[in-house]
Image (spheres, rainbow, N blue to C red):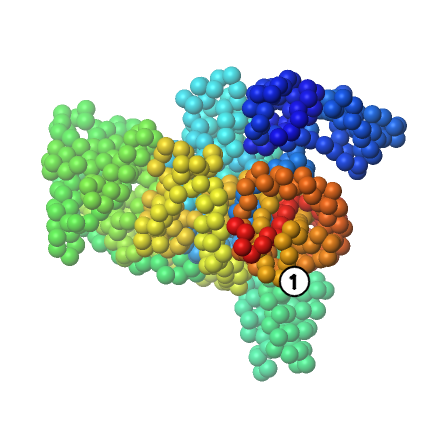
């Protein structure tokens, strides 16, 4: 028991966070303490009060309640109260009675906690040391931010995510062909930027039909919690800017683009990253700037990082494509003319790269290949590399290295590579075959009559256009729309689907289990217009009793998602989904292999978007494309143009827009005339083949070469695999769950069920008390196979929270344990000190990649002998035993002075290690940043795609890192006192 006196300062052993307490009153039975900082008063039994007296020694810095500091030199006791004597900050000798100590003085540093007798559990100390060790490793892993997401390791995606997320404020166009994973790439980039502190706030703008899909993908695959903002939510936050309601905000483009007030609010926020999906809708021309383009342009002028996603960048024309590139990098893309001219040059560059691969052959071809490379390069460093490559004295290794560097330089310095990334199926490989099935039907009489009249009477088309109010060629290729528009005509009283035999054809196929039937399979039906989609679903219900959910732009988000979910449900869901063109864009329907094009779109890129719903990563079957057509109809001619003019059903070729620009008008004119059509098809095919050859030799080839560099992709993949297979992870997880009170149950097959234990510490993600927890696995493949199972990795929010809490808090920073050792007499003391580097730096510098918190362990015996290298952490740890807290406190009190001495000695021991830690970090930083900088500087001399701002930012970053790393200091992070006991004591 201790003697209490009013005015003395004590702290609570169990509630150190209350701060420094003052004894208000005491008697034989009880003692009452006021904790001023937290405004709490506690009364304890005098005999068992869990309190420790606070007493400082010379060398300690203390604060007065008036805000001045004293460096303690001595102390005296006056009426049971301590008075500290020492110098203040001005060097004045002053006295500070303990009653005047600041209530807010913190006791969270290991040293203070230990010396005031606050000790944690031994296993907490253990976990703290291991946490530091693993955190240090992981922060330096080059795959940090990419290993956690629940995705397959697909090389082209990893390459792009790695390349883009390394850049300062990346501004790029992700333009992989449809369904190759642009959303995944954007998610990976975002995830990595967030984990490395390079971004904190992002705004994601997507078409309304994709908001839910994005929300789910970001949560399910990336464990990112996103705020979905709409008008209703915004109105509910009328007092504040609704865009401030989350760090990651997802909003519908249609909503934002139509709403200037909300746009102004979005612009008023500070964002690190802007992501815009289906960016081909941002249209721009000299005459008209679309509202979407204008909105994104304004946002992009202040947001540093911008990712635009589109599979069909040229769908709205080359001008719009160029305008989007300009929005990403206005300095580089200032002239459309020049942009067009540059394309001419791409063939030579691609040829130079091919020639490079053949060098040196050591035969007569070397001269020509060398000439091809030399024709493109003029920079001295590239010329030097070419000389090394072709020098007969170079060894194979030197040649290989020169070839690789030169290849990178050619790709980097010429072309659109830095801003645009486009992977194609052809290049990525492994995609299913596409098969076209035509069903030629006799046109029903209302359509036939119209077709005939159109063919015979030249003026009838104009009449129809006026009468129906439809556009040309819609009126020709969508006969149901034409018919619908003519319902004023008494002859056309019944709905079109009553006689349109495409409907009966579809119904028959749905139940047909023959070779071309759909029985037992899912079918996606796409029609151009929303009305056609709606009425077709109605027809199926009325005529065949078939339930077909509809999916179009007029439905609310909830309705759309419900329809998609109904379709996706394997067991009880509907067999088919009827979509409109726009409504289905970007959606994932790869679980289905039959696509019915109830009619045809007018643009080749739209055709590709349709097929892309099924032809996506994850599709395991050949894709069956079914098109019902009326014999001799304009739509049949349109199909021939697509099929025979440009093989549009076989694969994406990326030249559709160009062909449409060149022949769209002629085609419209030829939709009623077979002869004219044959001509258009022949000309289209010629241009198609020549453009394809040109593109493949030039632009496409450069884009392909640049969109995935296999060696880099493999390096990232193997760094990820290393983390996936990290044997330390399950061990660490077990230990951490034990300490935090998380119960886990093995479910077999590598699955674990995690749930809150009775004494779980609060606030762990996914584990609210009273709730059932979640099922998880460490295996990537198992997590990929089951949507309801979370994947545990070093990047999982639960692990990051546990590690963060340990590192940022005091948990386990003190301990006292007993050691039985035959060779050491009882009653001896040892201290195990863990120091940690601190390197204050702005978060976005991510200094941790070079100097993560690094532990320095020092083990001293009571005589001050250094035992660090003789006794390992693990070796010692497993022989230690716990001790009751009260006993630990008594021990500490009795060895107070000795401990202070050992702490001071340990500090000087650890300090010796600091210079080499700093030097190693500086070397790592310099070697990475200097070579990146040199590469970028060289690139900037030739390629204006490198923004000066990017270079400046890199130089600033290097300087800031240099200063931060230099300023790194060591601080005591944790301390364990070890006391030896007799072999036979317990
Ligand atoms: N690495 C991956 N691991 C697992 N699934 C993936 C991976 N990459 C893509 N997918 C899946 O493939 C589908 C297509 O990917 P995503 O939606 O990102 O493609 P996209 O290029 O954005 O398509 P679109 O051009 O239609 O917008 C999605 O269902 C996605 O979840």
Residue position for label 1: 870
Q: Residue at x 41, y 48 (%)?
A: 791
Residue at (27, 57) in percent of width and height = 622
Is residue 387 among what the camera can see? yes
Q: Position of residue 656 (x, y in %)?
A: 40, 50
Number of numbered tags placed on the structure image: 1
Vertical position of residue 497 compared to residue 196: above or below: above
Left or right: where does residue 723 sit relative to residue 871? left
Q: Residue at (47%, 34%) from the top-left corner?
A: 763
User: 595 or 647: which is nearer to us?
Assistant: 595
Quadrant housing residue 921: bottom right
Quick check: 18 left or right of 530? right
Is 15 situated left or right of 926 in this image?
left
The image shows residue 2 at horizontal and vertical percentages of 65, 29
Give the x, y percent position of residue 787. 34, 46
Q: Does residue 822 sit above or below 73 in this rendering? A: below
- For disc 1, the neighbor class at 10 Å (few under 14, some 14 to 19, many from 20) is few
Is 690 situated above or below 593? below
Q: Nearer the viewer, residue 352 or 45?
A: 45
- Can residue 832 be seen in the rendering of this structure? no
Q: Residue furthest right?
A: 92
Q: Nearer the viewer, residue 230 or 749?
A: 749
Q: Position of residue 374 (x, y in %)?
A: 65, 68
Q: Secondary structure at mark 1?
A: loop
Left or right, 99 with respect to 844, comes to right
Between residues 475 and 2, which one lies in front from this camera angle?
A: 2
């Amino acid at each position: 028991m201790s003697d209490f006196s009013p005015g003395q300062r004590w702290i609570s052993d169990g509630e150190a966070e209350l701060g420094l307490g003052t004894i208000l009153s005491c008697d034989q039975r009880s003692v009452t303490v006021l904790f001023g900082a937290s405004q709490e008063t506690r009364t304890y039994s005098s005999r068992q009060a869990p309190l420790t007296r606070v007493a400082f020694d010379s060398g300690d810095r203390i604060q007065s309640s008036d805000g001045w500091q004293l460096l303690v030199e001595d102390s005296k006791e006056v009426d049971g109260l301590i008075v500290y004597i020492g110098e203040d900050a001005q060097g004045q000798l002053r006295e500070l009675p303990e009653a005047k100590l600041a209530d807010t003085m913190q006791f969270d540093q290991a040293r203070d906690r230990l010396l005031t007798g606050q000790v944690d559990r031994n296993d907490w100390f253990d976990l703290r040391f291991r946490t530091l060790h693993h955190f240090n490793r992981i922060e330096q892993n080059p795959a940090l931010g990419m290993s956690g997401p629940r995705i397959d390791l697909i090389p082209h995606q990893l390459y792009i995510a790695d390349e883009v997320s390394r850049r300062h404020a990346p501004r790029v166009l992700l333009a992989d062909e449809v369904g190759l994973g642009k959303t995944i790439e954007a998610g990976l980039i975002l995830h990595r930027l967030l984990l490395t502190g390079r971004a904190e706030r992002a705004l994601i703008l997507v078409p309304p039909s994709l908001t839910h899909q994005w929300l789910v993908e970001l949560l399910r695959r990336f464990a990112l919690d996103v705020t979905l903002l709409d008008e209703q939510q915004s109105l509910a936050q009328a007092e504040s800017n609704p865009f401030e309601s989350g760090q990651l905000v997802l909003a519908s483009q249609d909503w934002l683009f139509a709403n200037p007030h909300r746009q102004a609010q979005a612009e008023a926020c500070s964002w690190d990253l802007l992501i815009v999906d289906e960016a081909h809708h941002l249209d721009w021309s000299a005459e008209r700037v679309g509202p979407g383009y204008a909105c994104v342009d304004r946002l992009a002028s202040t947001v540093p990082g911008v990712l635009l996603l589109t599979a069909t960048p040229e769908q709205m024309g080359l001008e719009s494509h160029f305008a989007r590139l300009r929005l990403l990098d206005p300095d580089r893309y200032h002239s459309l003319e020049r942009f067009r001219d540059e394309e001419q040059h791409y063939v030579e560059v691609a040829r130079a790269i091919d020639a490079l691969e053949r060098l040196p052959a050591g035969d007569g071809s070397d001269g020509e290949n060398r000439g091809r490379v030399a024709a493109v390069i003029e920079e001295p460093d590239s010329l030097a590399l070419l000389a090394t490559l072709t020098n007969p004295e170079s060894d194979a290794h030197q040649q290989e290295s020169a070839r690789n560097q030169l290849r990178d330089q050619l790709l980097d310095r010429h072309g659109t590579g830095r801003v645009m990334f486009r992977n194609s199926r052809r290049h990525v490989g492994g995609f299913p075959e596409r098969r076209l099935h035509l069903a030629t039907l006799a046109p029903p009489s209302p359509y036939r009559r119209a077709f005939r009249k159109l063919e015979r009477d030249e003026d009838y088309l104009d009449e129809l256009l006026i009468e129906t109010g439809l556009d040309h060629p819609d009126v020709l290729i969508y006969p149901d729309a034409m018919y619908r528009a003519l319902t004023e005509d008494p002859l056309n009283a019944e709905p079109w689907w009553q006689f349109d035999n495409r409907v009966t054809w579809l119904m028959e196929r749905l139940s047909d289990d023959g070779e071309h039937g759909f029985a037992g399979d899912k079918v996606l039906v796409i029609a151009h217009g929303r009305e056609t989609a709606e009425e077709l679903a109605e027809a199926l219900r009325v005529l065949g009793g078939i339930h077909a959910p509809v999916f179009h732009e007029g439905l609310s988000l909830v309705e759309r998602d419900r329809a998609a979910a109904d379709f996706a449900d394997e067991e009880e869901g509907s067999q088919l989904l009827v979509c409109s063109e726009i409504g289905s864009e970007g959606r994932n329907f790869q679980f289905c292999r039959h696509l019915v094009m109830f009619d045809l779109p007018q643009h080749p890129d739209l055709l590709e978007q349709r097929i892309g719903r099924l032809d996506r990563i994850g599709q395991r079957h050949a894709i069956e494309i079914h098109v019902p057509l009326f014999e001799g109809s304009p739509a049949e001619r349109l199909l021939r143009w697509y099929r025979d003019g440009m093989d549009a059903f076989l694969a994406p070729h990326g030249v559709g827009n160009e062909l449409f620009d060149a022949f769209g008008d002629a085609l419209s004119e030829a939709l009623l005339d077979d002869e004219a059509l044959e001509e258009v098809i022949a000309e289209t095919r010629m241009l198609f083949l020549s453009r394809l050859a040109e593109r493949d030799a030039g632009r496409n080839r450069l884009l392909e070469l640049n969109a995935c560099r296999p060696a880099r992709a493999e390096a990232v993949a193997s760094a990820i695999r290393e983390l996936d297979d990290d044997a330390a992870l399950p061990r660490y997880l077990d230990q951490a769950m034990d300490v935090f009170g998380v119960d886990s149950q093995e479910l077999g097959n590598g699955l674990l069920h995690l749930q809150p234990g009775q004494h779980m510490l609060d606030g762990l993600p996914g584990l609210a008390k009273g709730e059932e927890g979640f099922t998880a696995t460490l295996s990537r493949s198992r997590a990929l196979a089951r949507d309801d199972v979370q994947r545990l990795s070093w990047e999982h929010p639960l692990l990051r929270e546990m590690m963060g809490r340990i590192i940022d808090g005091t948990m386990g920073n003190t301990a006292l344990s007993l050691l039985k050792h035959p060779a050491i007499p009882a009653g001896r003391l040892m201290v195990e000190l863990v120091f940690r580097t601190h390197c204050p730096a702005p978060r976005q510098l991510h200094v941790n990649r070079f100097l993560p918190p690094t532990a320095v362990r020092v083990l001293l015996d009571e005589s001050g002998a250094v035992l660090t290298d003789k006794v390992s952490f693990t070796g010692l740890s497993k022989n230690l035993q716990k001790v009751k807290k009260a006993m630990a406190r008594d021990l500490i009190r009795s060895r107070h002075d000795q401990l202070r001495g050992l702490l001071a000695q340990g500090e000087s021991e650890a300090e010796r290690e600091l210079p080499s830690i700093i030097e190693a970090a500086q070397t790592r930083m310099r070697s990475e940043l200097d070579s990146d900088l040199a590469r970028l500087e060289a690139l900037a001399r030739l390629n204006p795609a490198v923004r000066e701002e990017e270079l400046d930012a890199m130089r600033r970053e290097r300087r800031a890192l240099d200063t931060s790393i230099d300023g790194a200091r060591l601080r005591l992070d944790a301390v364990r006192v070890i006391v030896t006991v007799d072999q036979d004591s317990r």
